[in-house]
Image: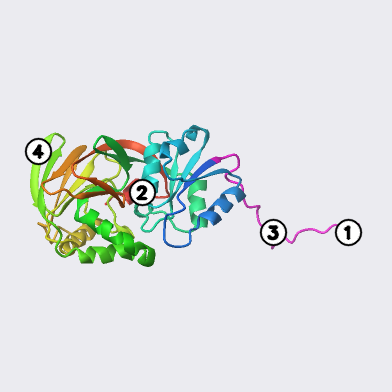
Amino acid sequence: MHLMTADPRTTSAPQDTHRLNGKRILVIFNPKSGSGDSELPEFLRLLRDAGAEVTERELQKDTPMSDYVRDLDHYQYLVGAGGDGTVSSLAYAARYRNVPMLAFPAGTANLIAQNLDLPTDAASLLRVVEEGHSLRLDMGEVEVKGETSGFCMLAGAGADATMIRDSEELKGRFGAMAYVMSAMKQLNPKKTTFHLTIDGQPREFEGIGVMVANFGMANYRLPITSDISPSDGRFTVILMKAGNLVRLIPNLIDSVRAKLNLGDPMFSGNLETLEARTVTVDAVDPFPLQYDGELHVETTPFEARILPGAVRFLTAAKKDDVET
């Protein structure tokens, strides 16, 4: 009997297509996030093809986020699929549980995923999970009227919250461009006197807003300002003194120059930055609040506290890649 043999010129080493064999992965997803097609169904298929045991849980109205992660200790990885608000709420519910989390970009802006330098396609996101590299990063905790929530990116009161409020009706049609369009409308934002308490020390200034930042990059990974680190156990508190958001563009240029080591700042006066572990923000005129892109009905005052090393995010990035 003639035995057929493989042609050595066309035979390659077998590919390891089951790198996640035996790994239990919990996927929490928000079906209302985003304005276009999501890569999530393809990502879930690829996870299962790679040998993972996947549990899917869809967010339901009025169900506390903590209910979805009660059994998190039985899983090796956590996936949060949605916008920044979904990701940060899930990360807060899972804080200090030591289970690496993937911030799956299924929202409109996906700033957390951008700060983590995550890819957007399902196959590349699968590789991030397979590699299993993670960074332990800080989170923020915000308290308003005795109720606490978590944020990964930033919390703000003033012009940035107003911008997010005005973008809501545009997001369905224009996606991430809605934020740009809304910012351009803020030519004459309300100015007021802010009263801050920075690590117990009082501070007062007149301006259009305050941002309490943990991550430091806006869309396209442009730095909001320099020297923001999500792993130093401190917030960067940004005092917005400019008359409108357009006047902050020169400060953005300065931040890019600093990131590229192009020399000293060329512009100043529109922003001031401080460092803090805890900060209380109040204003003479009440302002709406936003944290991680979600507008909330609460108004100032609010208190923000840093939660050092509260979450492990899956990413191929190194520590320096997530700093500005």
Which residue corresponds to mark 1?
A: 2
In the image, the segment drawn in magenta is 1-24
Q: CA distance from mark 2 to mark 4?
A: 30 Å
Q: Is residue 7 magenta?
A: yes
Q: Residue at x 22, y 66 (%)?
A: 184
Relative to 250, say whether 271 is above or below. Answer: above
Relative image position of residue 282 (x, y in whole percent)? 15, 43
Q: CA distance from mark 3 to mark 1?
A: 20 Å
Q: Please give the label number shown on residue 59.
A: none
Residue type marked 2: Gly
Nearest the viewer among 169 and 38 is 169
Q: Which secondary structure lies at badge 3?
A: loop
Which residue corresponds to mark 4?
A: 202
Which residue corresponds to mark 3?
A: 11
Which residue corresponds to mark 2?
A: 85
Name the mark nearer the viewer: 1 or 2: 2
